[in-house]
Amino acid sequence: MSDELDEIQAIFFEECTEGLLAAEQGLAAMQGGDTSPKTIASVFRAVHSIKGGAGAFGHAALTAFAHRFENVLDEIRAGRIAPTQGVISVMLGAFDKLSDHVAAAQGTMGLPDDAASLAALEAILAGKDVAPAAPVEAPVEVAPPVVVESSAADDIDPFGFEPVTVAIEDFAATDAAPMLPVDPEWTILFAPSRDAMANGAEPVLVIRELEGLGARVTDVDISGLPSLRDLDPEHAYLRWTISLPGDVGEDQIGDCFDFVAPDSIVEIMRTSSEAPPPPAVAPAPSAVVADVPLREPGAIHDLLHRVEVASPAIAAAAASATATPAAEGSAKRDPRTADTASQTIRVDLHKLDMLLNLVGELVIRGSILSDRLSPADQQRVELPEQARLTREIQDTVMSLRAQPIRQAFNRVPRMLRDLTAETGKQVVLETQGETTEVDKGVIEKIGDPLTHLIRNAVDHGIESPEDRLRAGKPAQGTIRLSAAQKGARIVVTVADDGRGIDRVRVRAKAIEKGLIGADAVLSDEEIDQLICAPGFSTATTVSNISGRGVGMDVVRSNVEALGGRVDISSAPGRGTTFTLVLPLTLAILDGMVVRLAGQRFVLPLAHVIEAIRPEPGQVRATTPGSEVIEVRGTYLPVRRLTQIFGLPDVNTLPPEESLVIIVESETAGKVGLIVDTIDDRREVVIKSLEQNLHPIRGLGGATILGDGSIALILDVDALVAPLSRTLTRGLAA
Amino acid sequence: MSMTENAGELKMVTFALGQQTFGIDMRSLIEIREWAPPTPLPSVPSYILGVTNLRGTVVPIVGLAERLGWTPSEIHSRSCVLVVSIAGKQAGFLVDEVNDIVGVQEDAIQPAPDVEIQDTNVIAGLVQITTRGNDGGTAASTMVLLLDLDALTVASTAVAGVGAATIATPATPVADASSVAATGGLDIAA
């Protein structure tokens, strides 16, 4: 049972992560000037969901903070507080605290000090215009109750539910002024799905939350209750009829049902029992099904038709319900939540990988099976059809691993806020191409390099506001983060408009650190590349942010480990751009299958320039053990894999009978590799060697060929790097 | 852990390697495969014979005899590979012949004395088992060397057993939490 709870709790934290993401995007949009009700509502909904879940799991501190945050959002949503830049910046601060609170609830950090943020939120609430200034959202309702309700929101309430005082004051108001037109009461029919409790959607919590709004349970239908013998204590059998004061906002009621299980029946309607029906147009009996995830939007209509209508007058109105703006708004809202609820599913990445392995195996078994059949049988329609289906499954499974790169980008704004607070620099972030889809594995691995690059940009790139103004630039620096797909590669750039790389200082530092000789002649690009050298740092003081000299080195090695590369371009006084060129997927590689000493290897096609069958004399030994090949007038070093790997050199063919594959490497430029033959060119699925062994220098992994055997994938850069270094050192000596 | 397993009883798979009989905790065994030449790897110790394809994952094959410092096993018709899971990683061990599955009381396992193996750390303990004679006749007593798989992990071999802790006490189960508990049963390729 506690395991189950842990599991549900884990889901809650995943939802928190998503909620935080949505809230942050919304807040960023608001900061950028988009204060549309839709955006504000998205932030509100996210924070509200976190609060609700936190309450259910007893995370009191998180619940309390989320509640205060939500109060302010609610006021903004209702149009009672204007979302000025000041207010938004307080909310961004509150958002950071909320993230910290979530982390604290997860146990990954201690409870954050949220006093300042709370005070700022309170200040916003206190300073708000209490006058009922144009309640944007409320339908054609009479204003007074709204005022009462909003003042109640000021009350300190450590827990997430709306204060009961609302109801009491409302009743008082009704008593004191009976002549006021009163909204008809709400009647709610609530029948939780049978397995509501198994889903963690405890109906009692919903009813308590409703009671917090002043609800009374008027009837409990126990007809569904089986005899004790058949009773499953984990099932929900009851149906409740609940009445609520009429002035409670419909969205407030809807919010209570945020966490009900799918398939629950929730019907919310106005009844006319105590008050005369309001003027014709007024609150239409917009029977709204709360945020119950629906399979398809069409279901809304079905539900609308299922509304039980209390009086003929309302029945007439109900008939036109879909046409009224209120109902339309709700109908619009619901399919959207339904979309997100029904179209995504969380899957353990491990399971996807397992699926991918199994499908790969299926392909292999299929081709082995095909080989065993007679050629006539191989052509039968069943077999090709099956092969096609298998391939489709394979492609689909691969695509499941693709995720928008937003997931890697979304930690940046928070970090930037911390960094600017720490350094006093002013930086605005522009992002582009967040929807670019990349393999999940790539996303996971570029987080750290991105963090380093952003830190570097703020710490070394962007100048202080004074310096910037002096240089004739706006005080506020800009960091542009963008992603785009180019062919089979993803290009991620981090560009700042700061001071650029100080090449004189970089050079001096490199000489001081012994990375280059004092008289070395280096191009600007080569100097820029020096900042990626291990142990290099130009920061005069070691700051908290960067300057430990590991940053850029780590960036480069991480990116190269992914099969990508880092390009640097910098213009003095105008800024620096780091470009990460990454593979689209870590799982598939376009490769050339070559044969060498009886073994098959895969050369990544991205590195292959050409294959040459050398003429006699085209490959020449320069020293014993090193050879060069002459290609159109240029001499390129030649490597024998048998030597590099220490493979048995038994039947090494003379160069004329083997092939020289010219490869382009990051580390040593163009190099020729001698192989026996080329077998095939194909896409291969990369299998890691680390999973069960350890990384092997010179190998990028392994793959399983069509016959079920394994071929090793060559890591060209690593293969040729050490040798070329030895070569240059040898020349220098 | 299956319910039929008695408290304090350890199920182990015994196999022959050279003249010796070895045992491993059955909970870490995934399957037993017929020998097939693996794909050799460059720049690895000689006892890593290569890698093979186990249902889509790449698994290293270790020559257990070489790993333990003996002359390499000769391949013959009964040679097989024990695929085990050690601390979440899978590896296949080439052995001469798989013998039996036996249950032993954990308190019957004696600590390993200084046996003639390069690093004694890989031996978790010694245990006497009674084997049925080939002709169903007299029962013979055999000494089984119980291997400490954790000490044999391919990764830890890089430090040549230096990092491996002191000789495992007999009470310590050979493989722990991460073992696959022989869920699939024995999958002996005929």
Image (cartoon, helix red, strand yellow):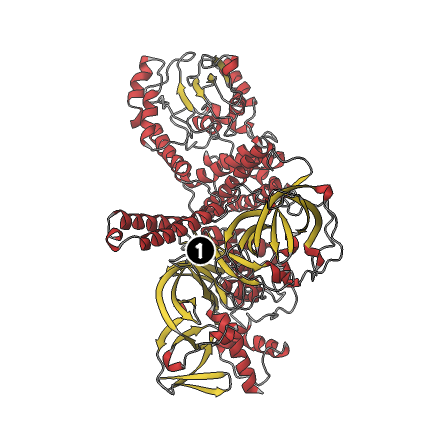
Q: Is residue A224 shown above or below A617?
A: above
Residue A3 at x, y = what percent?
Answer: 58, 34
In this rendered view, identify the residue nearer to me: A157 or A242: A242
Question: In which image quadrant can residue A306 be found?
Answer: top left
Q: Can the viewer see residue A549 in this picture?
A: yes
Instruction: Give the chain of mark 1.
Output: A
Q: Secondary structure at mark 1?
A: strand
The quarter in which the N terminus of chain A is drawn is: top right
Q: Is residue A243 shown above or below B139?
A: above
The quarter in which the C terminus of chain A is drawn is: bottom right
Q: Is residue A397 left or right of residue A548?
A: left
Count numbered badges in the picture: 1
Q: Is residue B12 left or right of residue A382?
A: right
In this rendered view, identify the residue nearer to me: B143 or A655: B143
Q: Can the viewer see residue A176 in this picture?
A: no
- Residue shown at 36%/75% (left/top)? A611
Q: Which residue is mark 1?
A: A431
Determine crowd level at label 1: few under 14, some 14-19, many 20+ residues with C-alpha closer than 10 A. Answer: some
Question: In which image quadrant can residue B183 be found?
Answer: top right
Residue A334 at x, y = what percent?
Answer: 38, 32
Q: Amino acid at mark 1?
A: Thr
